Image: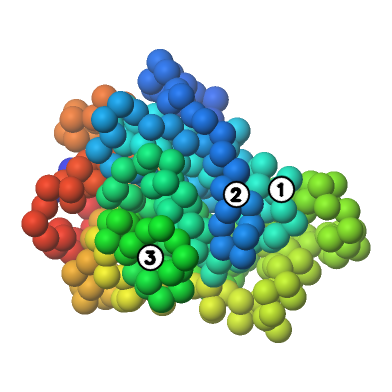
């Protein structure tokens, strides 16, 4: 049973929670961090299409399982504090951890000019990394995780793991080695949510902030691989949509951004997930179209392998609980979602069957 999420009174708005998590939490998270980081070892591993992927791997003494995770639409392993908190807690509880810069991000962007595909190939990347991690001594079961767009990538990873025998016969890993996964506020349907954002002044502001970061990322890619990226195309990439239109879809063979978003949508994957999958999703997430909520609930009600925990509050990858909420959940700090993921993984390890679906508001 997952304890309810209770934010402090001043973070009960999804927008306020999201802005606080974006602007203030990065400066304050270390106050609730553990006094040590996992002893990471750097590795450059090979993903799908032979794309080099930069990873950090830490294996504790007598590890009980492995967690493979990445972050959202922007950032890198050096600045993604939420991912580092998740890894700290997982390692302290006996999990080997594998963190990676996904395509076109961080040090992976330095290694390759390959652009993002919103899960179409990153899902296979997850499975490739699982095979490499297993060979390096990371134990099974292996769990996939991510948040925001990284959550969409992890869902694709879970889906691709189900059929690895069909497409990854050369990989030294079986579908049974990969247990499933857990995601926080995953992106599920990009086109609808972008249109929802652009219809609201505050939404347009949030989209503009993300688009500005994507444009900076594109200029970094040009710096690393000047022959691969056209400066004029980058100059026209002034929104999330135009970034994908100018730089991404042509390389992936799509005629329109809408076609690309439809193909990479994780919403369509949810009914087809047949490994235990936890999804934490906030009804007040300001980045996603609210009309997705009843659709997600309907899908979860029909899929016993999808454990949806829908909360009234939480914002976008916020889930910062108040003192009362921490006491109720028995958490040592305000990072409610991190503790739920790790507790769920532990429960899944000893459960004889997947958890029943939870579809109500909490």
- In this picture, residue 29 sits left or right of residue 293: right
- Asked if the residue at tag 1 contacts the one at tag 2, i.e. Cβ–Cβ closer than 8 Å, the answer is yes
The span from disc 3 to disc 1 (Cα, nearest Å) is 25 Å
Q: Which residue is mark 1?
A: 111
- Asked if the residue at tag 2 contacts the one at tag 3, i.e. Cβ–Cβ closer than 8 Å, the answer is no
How would you rate the neighbour count of disc 3 (Cα within 10 Å): few for under 14, some for 14-19, many for 20 or more? many
Question: Is 283 drawn above or below residue 252 in the view shown?
Answer: above
- Residue 114 rendering spot, x and y as whole percentages: 70, 60
- Residue 169 rendering spot, x and y as whole percentages: 43, 69
Going from N to C along the chain, the mark reached first, 3 or 1, is 1
- Asked if the residue at tag 1 contacts the one at tag 3, i.e. Cβ–Cβ closer than 8 Å, the answer is no
What secondary structure is marked by label 1?
A: helix
Q: Which residue is mark 3?
A: 161
Picture quarter containing residue 22?
Answer: top right
Given residues 184 and 53, the one toward you in this image is: 53
- In this picture, residue 129 sits left or right of residue 108: left
């Amino acid at each position: 049973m997952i304890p309810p999420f209770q934010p402090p009174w001043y973070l009960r708005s999804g927008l306020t929670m999201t802005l606080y998590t974006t602007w203030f939490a990065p400066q304050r998270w270390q106050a609730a961090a553990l006094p040590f980081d996992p002893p990471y070892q750097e590795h450059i591993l090979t993903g799908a299409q032979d794309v080099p992927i930069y990873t950090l791997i830490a294996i504790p003494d007598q590890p009980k399982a492995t967690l493979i995770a990445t972050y959202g639409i922007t950032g890198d392993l050096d600045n993604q504090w939420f991912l580092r908190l998740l890894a700290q807690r997982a390692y302290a509880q006996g999990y080997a951890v594998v963190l990676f810069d996904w395509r076109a991000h961080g040090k992976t962007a330095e290694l390759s000019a390959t652009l993002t595909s919103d899960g179409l190939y990153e899902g296979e990347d997850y499975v490739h990394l699982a095979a490499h991690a297993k060979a390096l001594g990371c134990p099974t079961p292996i769990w996939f995780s991510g948040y925001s767009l990284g959550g969409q990538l992890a869902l694709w990873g879970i889906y691709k793991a189900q059929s690895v025998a069909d497409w990854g016969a050369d990989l030294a890993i079986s579908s049974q080695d990969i247990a499933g996964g857990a995601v926080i506020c995953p992106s599920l349907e990009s086109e609808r949510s972008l249109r929802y954002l652009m219809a609201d002044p505050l939404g347009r502001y949030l989209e503009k902030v993300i688009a500005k970061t994507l444009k900076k990322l594109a200029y970094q890619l040009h710096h690393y691989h000047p022959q691969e990226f056209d400066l004029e195309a980058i100059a026209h990439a002034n929104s999330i949509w135009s970034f994908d239109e100018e730089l991404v879809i042509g390389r992936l063979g799509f005629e329109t951004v809408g076609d690309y978003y439809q193909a990479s949508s994780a919403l369509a994957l949810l009914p087809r997930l047949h490994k235990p999958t936890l999804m934490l999703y906030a009804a007040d997430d300001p980045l996603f179209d609210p009309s997705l909520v009843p659709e997600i609930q309907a899908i979860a009600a029909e899929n016993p392998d999808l454990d949806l925990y829908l909360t009234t509050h939480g914002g976008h990858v916020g889930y910062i609980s108040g003192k009362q909420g921490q006491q109720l959940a028995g958490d040592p700090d305000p990072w409610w979602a991190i503790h739920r993921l790790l507790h769920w993984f532990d429960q899944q390890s000893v459960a004889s069957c997947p958890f029943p679906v939870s579809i109500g508001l909490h």
